[in-house]
Image (cartoon, rainbow, N blue to C red):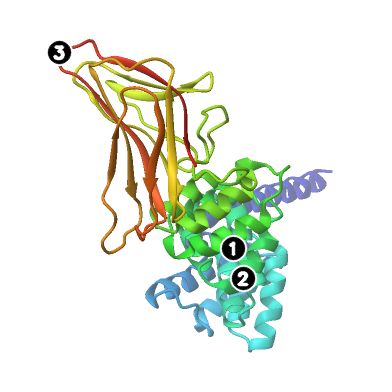
Amino acid sequence: MVLKNIIIWFFGLAVALLAGLIAMAAIAKDKAPALAITLSPVNGFAAENLAAAFIKNSVAENEGQIPNHLTPNTERFALRAFVAEPITPEAVAVLALGRGERNRQKLMGLALALSRRQPLVTGWMIVDSGKRQNIPELLKHYDTILRTNSSAASSVMPILARALADIGFLAPFEELLRKQPPWANQFWGTVVNTPESLANATSLRKVLYEQSENKEAYRDAELIRALIANQEFEQAFDLYHHFVGDKKTRSPLEKGSFKTELAYSPLDWQLFSTGEYGAAINDGKLELSAIRNSGGLFARQLIKMPPRTLIMKVRPDAPITDNAQLFVTLECAESIKNPPRKIRIPLKAEIRNLQIGNTNSGCRFFWLDFHGRAAGNGDGFDVTIDSISLL
C-alpha cells in the first residue's frame, strides 16, 4: 500500500513538473524563444519563432528579399518546430523556403491553410503572385493581410492605390471591391490622394456604382474634388452625372435654384464660412452674411461653359444695401496659355439678361463665384439670393 502511494505521488510530481515546464515554455516562447527552446519537452512554437526570426532578419538585411535557401541553424529549428507541433504555419513556411520551386509552392499553400495571419506566409505569396503576374491572386493576399492585421493598412494602402494606376488592375480590383471588404473606405480615401491613379479610379467607381449601394464604403465627393484639383474637369463632370443623372437643361450651372441637396461640391455649390463672414443655404435660398469690414469668397461652383454667348440672371429677394459690396465673378479654371480676363459683375439689384460672351475665349471650365465685403463704417449685411441662371 505504501509502495502504491509512493508510485502515485511520484507520478503526480512528474506530471506537475512536466505541466510546469510546458507552461513555462509557452510563456517564454514569444518573449524569450531562445530560453523556451532549451526546456524539455521542446516547445514547437518557440522553435518556430526562432526559425522565423532568422528569416525575418535575412529579409531586413537584404532589402526585403525573401531568401530561397536556409542556413543549417534555421532549418534545424524549423524541423524541431514541425516535429513538436506539426501545425506551426511559420515552421512549414520556413521549411518551404529551402525546397525546390514546386515543393515550395505546395508547402506555402499548406502553411497558408494553417493560418492566414502569418506575414511571412502572405508576404511570400504576394511576391510569388507578383512574379507570376497573377493580379487577382496578388490582390487576394493583400486582402488577407488587411483583414487579419489592422496595423498593415498604413503600409499596404499606398501600394494598392498606386497599383490602380495600371490598367491591368482594373478588373481584379472590381472583382475584389464588389465584395465590399471592410477596408474599402480607407482604400478610396488613399486613392483620392494618388493623382496617377485618379483616371482609373473614376472608371472603377463608375463600374461599381449602384443606386442601392452602401455609400459609406466610398469617397465620391472627395474623388470629384481630387479630379478637379488635378484639372481633370471632364472626368469630374462625367462622374458627377453618373451619380446624379444627365442634365435636364442647357444651363452650364448644375445648381442655380439652391433648392436641392448639395452633395458634390464644387460641381454643386461650395460654401465658405469664417467667424466674420460666410454663406449658407436655407429654405432653397443662398444666404450671404458679413460683419463690418469683413468678407471674401462666399460661394462658388465649377461650370462648363459652351463656346457661345450666354444670358445671366441673378435675383436677390430684396434690394442690396449700400454697405454691401457684392460681385458675381467668372474666371477660367484651366491652366491655359492666354486665358480670358476675369469677369467681375457688381451685384446691387436684380440682374436681368446680362450677356456673357465665351465664343473665342479658349476656355471651357470656369469658376462662378460670389465675392463680397461689408463696409468698414456699417453694421455688416445679410443678403439672400433667390436664384441665379446662365443660359
Q: Which mark is first along the chain, 3 or 2?
A: 2
Q: Residue at x 56, y 27 (%)?
A: 259
The quadrant of the rendering that contains the N terminus is: top right
Give above or below for 73 relative to 177.
below
The residue tagged with tag 2: helix, strand or loop? helix
- Rendered image: mark on residue 377: 3
Q: Nearer the viewer, residue 26 or 169?
A: 169
Q: Residue at x 66, y 71 (%)?
A: 137
Mark 3, other Cα within 10 Å: few <14 / some 14–19 / many ≥20: few
Residue 97 showing in the rendered view: yes
Q: Residue at x 61, y 55 (%)?
A: 205
Q: In the image, is 375 to the left or to the right of 46?
A: left
Q: Which residue is mark 1?
A: 142
Residue lying furthest right: 1
Q: Give how far across and how far down residue 60 sits, in percent.
A: 40, 71
Q: Which mark is first along the chain, 1 or 3?
A: 1
Q: Give how far across and how far down residue 88 sits, in percent.
A: 66, 65
Amino acid beneath label 3: Asn
Amino acid beneath label 2: Leu
Q: Which residue is mark 2?
A: 138
- Rendered image: mark on residue 103: none
Q: Nearer the viewer, mark 2 or mark 3?
A: 3
Q: Are marks 2 and 3 in contact (CB under 8 Å)?
A: no
Q: In the image, is 308 to the left or to the right of 325?
A: right
Q: Are marks 2 and 1 in contact (CB under 8 Å)?
A: yes
Q: Give how far across and how far down residue 219 sits, in percent.
A: 54, 46
Q: Nearer the viewer, residue 221 or 191?
A: 221
Residue lying furthest top: 379
Mark 2, other Cα within 10 Å: few <14 / some 14–19 / many ≥20: many
Amino acid beneath label 1: Tyr
Q: Residue at x 66, y 53 (%)?
A: 18
